[in-house]
C-alpha cells in the first residue's frame, strides 16, 4: 500500500487513469445515446446520409489508429525492458500516425464543407430531418474525437521527451503506460464511430 | 501561537511555511489537503450566503408581485439562486470542504492520492465560479432559464447562457477530479490495519459519492456542450425544426442531476453517522448496513432520473418503471435513518449543537423523503409536478438535509479546524431561529403546492396570498438564525476559548491529533487495531 | 494475481503483433459484412458485434486488462453497465411512446 511511503504507488496511478477513462466512456456515451435514439427514429435518413461518407478515407483512418495502438503498446513493452531507443522510435511512430489521422480528417471535413454540409448551413437545412441530425452528430462526434486525438498527440510528444531524458525509464514508466491507456481508449471510440458513420448504408 | 522554534511539521497548518513571499500565493499554490479544504470551505460558505440573499429577495418579491422586481429579473433571481446554491455550494459542498480536510486523517493517510490534482480541482472551482459570476455581471441578461437550462429556450434566449454553461462545465470537471482523487485515496492510502470495514462511515459515503461524481458528471458535461454547440453553431439536437427532441435534453440533463442529489446528500449522511455515535456514547448501530447502504443509494439513484419528467411526454412504460425504482431508493435511505435512531436509543445523550443539528437533519430529511414518496408515485406527481410542493420537498432534503448537516459539521469540527470553541449558547439560539423559520418557510410550500400554486411563477391569484406571506415571514426567522449561527462561528475564530484536542470524546483518528491540526497529519503512521466507534467495548 | 504481477509482466511482442493482425482481419470482416450484406437485416448488429470484438482485443491485450486484477475488470463492467442502463431506459421511453 502507498501509506508506507506517503505517496501513491504504481498500481494507484494506473487505477486513477482507468477511472478517468470511465468518465470518458460516459462523456462519449452521451453522444452515442443521442446517435442511437435518432438512428432509431430516422433509420432511412441515416442510411442515405451515410452514403455521403468517404469509406476509403474512413477505412484508412481506422487502419492508422489500430496500428498506432500497436506501436504505443510495444513502446511500453520495450521501456519495461529498458530499451529506451526502440521505445522512442515507436512513440514517434504513434505521434506521426496520430497526425496522419488528423490530416485525413481535415480533408474529409473540408470536402463536406465545400459542398455546403455543415451545422446550420442553408444546404443542410434543406435536407431531411434525419439527415440534418446525422451530419450534426458526425461533426460533433468526430470533432470531439479528433480533439482527443490532438491532445493525445501532444501528450505522447511530452512522453517522448521524458523518455529521451530518462525521466521515464524501466522503473518509472507509469506516465507512459497511462498515456498508452488513453490512446487505446481513443482508438476504441473510433472503432465504434467507424461502422456507425461509414458502414450503415 | 506556537513558537517558531518548533519544527514546521508540528506547527498549526495555518502558520507560514515560508515557501512563498506572499501569503495568498502560499495558500493558492498549496497542495496540502487541509489548506485546500479550508479555502474551499470559505468559498462555499460565501456562495451560500449569496444564494441565501437571492432566496430572501425571491420571497420578498412574492409578498406583492411587482413591488420589488419585474418579471424578467424575477426569472433571473430564481435561476441564479439555483445555479449558485447547487453548483457553487451544495454539490461541491461537503466533499471539497470536510472531505478534503478530514478524509486523509480519518483513514490514517498523509494526504490524498494526488495532491496536485487536488489543487487543480480547487483552481478549476475558482475558474468555474468566475465564469458563472461573469455571466451575471457582463453586458446582456443574466441566465433566466432556471438552473435546469431546458432546451429549446436555453438555445434561443439572448441571456448569457453560453458563459454560464461553460462555467458549470468547468465546475463539473473539478467535481470529477475530486471524486477520482478520493476513490483512489481510499483504495491505496489507508493506514496499516485500516481495513475497509474499520473505516468510519464518512469515508464510506465519500467513496460512494466519488463513484457517482465520476460516472454521472460526464453526462452533464456533454449535455452542456450540446447547449453551447446549439447556441454557437446551430447544432439542433433538441430543436424540433431540425429533427431534434427536447425530451432527450431532459433525459440527458436528469441523468446527471438526479445522481447529483446523492452527491449532495450521501456525504451529509456520512457526517450524521459520525456525530450521532459520539454524542450518544454508543457504537453506530448497524455499521455494516449503514456503509453498504451508501453504495445502495448510489447505485439505485442512478436509475430513477425519469421521475423529474413524468409530465414531459414520456411513454407510460418508462414512467411506471421510473416510479417503481424511485420507491426502491427509499429502502437504503430508511436503513440509515433507523440505524441512527437505534444508535441514540439508550445512549448517554449530550445535547450539544452538533447533535442538535444532526437530530434536525434526521427529522427534516425524513419529511423531505416522505414527501418524495408522494411525488415519486406517478398519479399524484401529475398534479404536483411544477408546483410549490416540489420546491418544499427539495428544500427539506437539500437544505434541511445537506444544509443542516454542513452546519452540524461546522460546529462538530470547529475546534479541530480552528483550535477554538464556539459559544454553545448562541449556537442553540441560532438553531432555534433557523429550525422554526425553516419549517414555517418551507412547510407552507407543501400547502401552496397542494392547492395548485405553480413554481417559478412571478405572479399568482389572490387565494395564495396568505400562504406566501407566511412563507416569507418564515424566511426572516431563518435569516436571523443563519446570522446568529455564522456570527457566532466567525467571532469564535478570533475570540473563542482555546479548544482541547478532543472536546467531544470522539474516537476517530482526527481527535487523537492536536487542535488545530498541524502541517503533517501524523508524526508516525498509525496502525489500526479496532473499529471506528468502540464505545461499548471500552465501557466494558 | 499476486500484488505487482500486472506491473512486472511484459507482454511478448509476438502476442501484440498477433492482436494487431487480428484487428486488421476484423476490420476487413466488418467491411465485408456491410458491403456484401452478408447478414441481411442484421448488418448493423453484426458490425457492432465485430466492433465490440475489436474493442475487446484492444482492452484485453493492448490495455493489459487480461493481466489485471478482478477489481479493475469489474469496475469497467460497472461503467459499461451504467451507460447501457442510461441508453436502455431512454429507449424504453422513445420506443414505446
Image (spheres, rainbow, N blue to C red):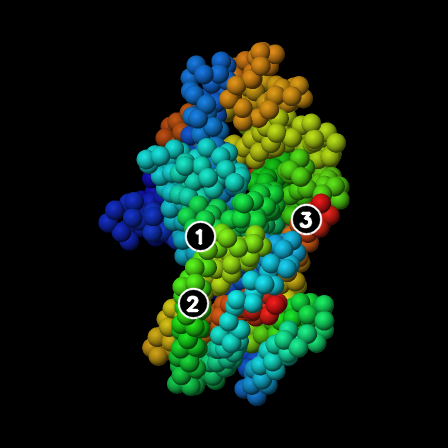
Q: Is residue A172 above or below residue B324?
A: below
The residue labelled by disc 3 is C94
Q: Distance between the residues labelled 3 and 2?
A: 34 Å
Residue drawn where x is 40% and y is 77% of the image: A96
**Other residues around mark 1 within 10 Å, as few (<14) / some (14–19) / many (≥20):** few
Dot 3 crowding, Cα within 10 Å, few <14, some 14–19, many 20+: some
Q: Nearer the viewer, mark 3 or mark 2?
A: 2
Q: Residue at x 31, y 49 (%)?
A: B26
Chain containing mark 2: A
Q: Using the rendered image, report if marks 3 and 2 lie on a common chain.
A: no
Q: Mark 3 lies on which chain?
A: C
Rendered position, B79 above or below B332: above
Q: Quadrant of residue B142?
A: top left
The residue tagged 1 is: A122
Q: Distance between the residues labelled 2 and 1?
A: 16 Å
Residue at the (44%, 30%) spot, across then down: B76
Marks 3/1: CA–CA distance? 29 Å
- Do labels 2 and 1 touch, CB within 8 Å? no
Query: Residue C49: percent from the left, percent from the top?
Result: 67, 70
What residue occupies the far bottom of the structure in this picture? Answer: C14
Q: Is residue B429 left or right of residue B14?
A: right
Regarding residue A125, the answer to whether it shows in the image is yes
The answer to which image quadrant residue B290 occupies is top right
Q: Position of residue A92 (x, y in %)?
A: 39, 79
Viewer-side residue, A105 vs B442 = A105
Mark 1 and mark 3 in contact (Cβ < 8 Å)?
A: no
Q: Can residue B48 be seen by looking at this rendering? A: no
Chain letter of mark 1 equals A
Label 2 neighbourhood size at 10 Å, few (<14), some (14-19), many (20+)?
Answer: some
Q: Which mark is residue A111?
A: 2
Amino acid at each position: 500500500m502507498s501509506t508506507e511511503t506517503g505517496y501513491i504507488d504504481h498500481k494507484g496511478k494506473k487505477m486513477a487513469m482507468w477511472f478517468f477513462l470511465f468518465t470518458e466512456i460516459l462523456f462519449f456515451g452521451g453522444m452515442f445515446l443521442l446517435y442511437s435514439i435518432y438512428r432509431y427514429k430516422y433509420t432511412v435518413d441515416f442510411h442515405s446520409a451515410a452514403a455521403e461518407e468517404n469509406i476509403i478515407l474512413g477505412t484508412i483512418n481506422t487502419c492508422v489508429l489500430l496500428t498506432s495502438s500497436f506501436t504505443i503498446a510495444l513502446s511500453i513493452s520495450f521501456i519495461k525492458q529498458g530499451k529506451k531507443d526502440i521505445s522512442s522510435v515507436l512513440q514517434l511512430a504513434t505521434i506521426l500516425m496520430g497526425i496522419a489521422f488528423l490530416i485525413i480528417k481535415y480533408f474529409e471535413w473540408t470536402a463536406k464543407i465545400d459542398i455546403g454540409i455543415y451545422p446550420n448551413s442553408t444546404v443542410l437545412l434543406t435536407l431531411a430531418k434525419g439527415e440534418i441530425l446525422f451530419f450534426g452528430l458526425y461533426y460533433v462526434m468526430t470533432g470531439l474525437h479528433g480533439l482527443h486525438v490532438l491532445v493525445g498527440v501532444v501528450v505522447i510528444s511530452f512522453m517522448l521527451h521524458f523518455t529521451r531524458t530518462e525521466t521515464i525509464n524501466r522503473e518509472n514508466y507509469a506516465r507512459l503506460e497511462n498515456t498508452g491507456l488513453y490512446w487505446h481508449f481513443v482508438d476504441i471510440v473510433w472503432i465504434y464511430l467507424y461502422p456507425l458513420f461509414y458502414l450503415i448504408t | 501561537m506556537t513558537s517558531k522554534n518548533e519544527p514546521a511539521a508540528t506547527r498549526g497548518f495555518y502558520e507560514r511555511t515560508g515557501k512563498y513571499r506572499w501569503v495568498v500565493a502560499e495558500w493558492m499554490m498549496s497542495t496540502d489537503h487541509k489548506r485546500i479544504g479550508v479555502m474551499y470551505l470559505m468559498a462555499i460558505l460565501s456562495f451560500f450566503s449569496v444564494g441565501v440573499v437571492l432566496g430572501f429577495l425571491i420571497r420578498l418579491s412574492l409578498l406583492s408581485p411587482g413591488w420589488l422586481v419585474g418579471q424578467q429579473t424575477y426569472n433571473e433571481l430564481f435561476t441564479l439562486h439555483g445555479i449558485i446554491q447547487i453548483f457553487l455550494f451544495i454539490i461541491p459542498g461537503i466533499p471539497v470542504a470536510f472531505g478534503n480536510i478530514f478524509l486523509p486523517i480519518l483513514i490514517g493517510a498523509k494526504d490524498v492520492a494526488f495532491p496536485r490534482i487536488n489543487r487543480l480541482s480547487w483552481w478549476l472551482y475558482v475558474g468555474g465560479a468566475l465564469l458563472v459570476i461573469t455571466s451575471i455581471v457582463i453586458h446582456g441578461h443574466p441566465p433566466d432559464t432556471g438552473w435546469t437550462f431546458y432546451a429549446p429556450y436555453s438555445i434561443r434566449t439572448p441571456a448569457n447562457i453560453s458563459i454560464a454553461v461553460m462555467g458549470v462545465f468547468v465546475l463539473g470537471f473539478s467535481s470529477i477530479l475530486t471524486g477520482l482523487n478520493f476513490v483512489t485515496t481510499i483504495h491505496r492510502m489507508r493506514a496499516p490495519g485500516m481495513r475497509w470495514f474499520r473505516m468510519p462511515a464518512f469515508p464510506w459515503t465519500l467513496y460512494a459519492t466519488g463513484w457517482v461524481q465520476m460516472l454521472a458528471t460526464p453526462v452533464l458535461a456533454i449535455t452542456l456542450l450540446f447547449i453551447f454547440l446549439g447556441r454557437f453553431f446551430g447544432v439542433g439536437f433538441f430543436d424540433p425544426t431540425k429533427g431534434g427532441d427536447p425530451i432527450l435534453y431532459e433525459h440527458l440533463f436528469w441523468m446527471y442531476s438526479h445522481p447529483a442529489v446523492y452527491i449532495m446528500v450521501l456525504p451529509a449522511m456520512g457526517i450524521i453517522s459520525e456525530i450521532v455515535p459520539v454524542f450518544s456514547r454508543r457504537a453506530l448501530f448497524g455499521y455494516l448496513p449503514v456503509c453498504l447502504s451508501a453504495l445502495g443509494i448510489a447505485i439505485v439513484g442512478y436509475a430513477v432520473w425519469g421521475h423529474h419528467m413524468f409530465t414531459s411526454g414520456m411513454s407510460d412504460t418508462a414512467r411506471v418503471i421510473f416510479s417503481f425504482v424511485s420507491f426502491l431508493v427509499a429502502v437504503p435511505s430508511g436503513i440509515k435513518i433507523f440505524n441512527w435512531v437505534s444508535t441514540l436509543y439508550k445512549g448517554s445523550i449530550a445535547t450539544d449543537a452538533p447533535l442538535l443539528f444532526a437530530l434536525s437533519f434526521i427529522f427534516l430529511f425524513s419529511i423531505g423523503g416522505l414527501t418524495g414518496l408522494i411525488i415519486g408515485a406517478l398519479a399524484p406527481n401529475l398534479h404536483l409536478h411544477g408546483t410549490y410542493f416540489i420546491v418544499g420537498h427539495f428544500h427539506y432534503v437539500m437544505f434541511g438535509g445537506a444544509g443542516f448537516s454542513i452546519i452540524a459539521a461546522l460546529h462538530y469540527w470547529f475546534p479541530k479546524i480552528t483550535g477554538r470553541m464556539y459559544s454553545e449558547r448562541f449556537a442553540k439560539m441560532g438553531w432555534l431561529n433557523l429550525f422554526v423559520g425553516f419549517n414555517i418557510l418551507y412547510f407552507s410550500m407543501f400547502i401552496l403546492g397542494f392547492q395548485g400554486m405553480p413554481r417559478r411563477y412571478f405572479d399568482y391569484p389572490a387565494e395564495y396570498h396568505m400562504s406566501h406571506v407566511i412563507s416569507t415571514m418564515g424566511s426572516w426567522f431563518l435569516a436571523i438564525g443563519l446570522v446568529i449561527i455564522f456570527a457566532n462561528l466567525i467571532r469564535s475564530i478570533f475570540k473563542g476559548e482555546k479548544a482541547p484536542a478532543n472536546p467531544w470524546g470522539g474516537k476517530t483518528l482526527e481527535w487523537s491529533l492536536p487542535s488545530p491540526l498541524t502541517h503533517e497529519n501524523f508524526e508516525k503512521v498509525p496502525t489500526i487495531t479496532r473499529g471506528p466507534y468502540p464505545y461499548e467495548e471500552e465501557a466494558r | 494475481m499476486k500484488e505487482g504481477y500486472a506491473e512486472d509482466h511484459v507482454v511478448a511482442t509476438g502476442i501484440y503483433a498477433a492482436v494487431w493482425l487480428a484487428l486488421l482481419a476484423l476490420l476487413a470482416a466488418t467491411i465485408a459484412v456491410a458491403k456484401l450484406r452478408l447478414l441481411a437485416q442484421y448488418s448493423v448488429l453484426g458490425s457492432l458485434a465485430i466492433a465490440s470484438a475489436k474493442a475487446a482485443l484492444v482492452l484485453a491485450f493492448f490495455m493489459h486488462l487480461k493481466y489485471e486484477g478482478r477489481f479493475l475488470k469489474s469496475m469497467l463492467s460497472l461503467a459499461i453497465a451504467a451507460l447501457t442502463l442510461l441508453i436502455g431506459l431512454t429507449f424504453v421511453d422513445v420506443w414505446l411512446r
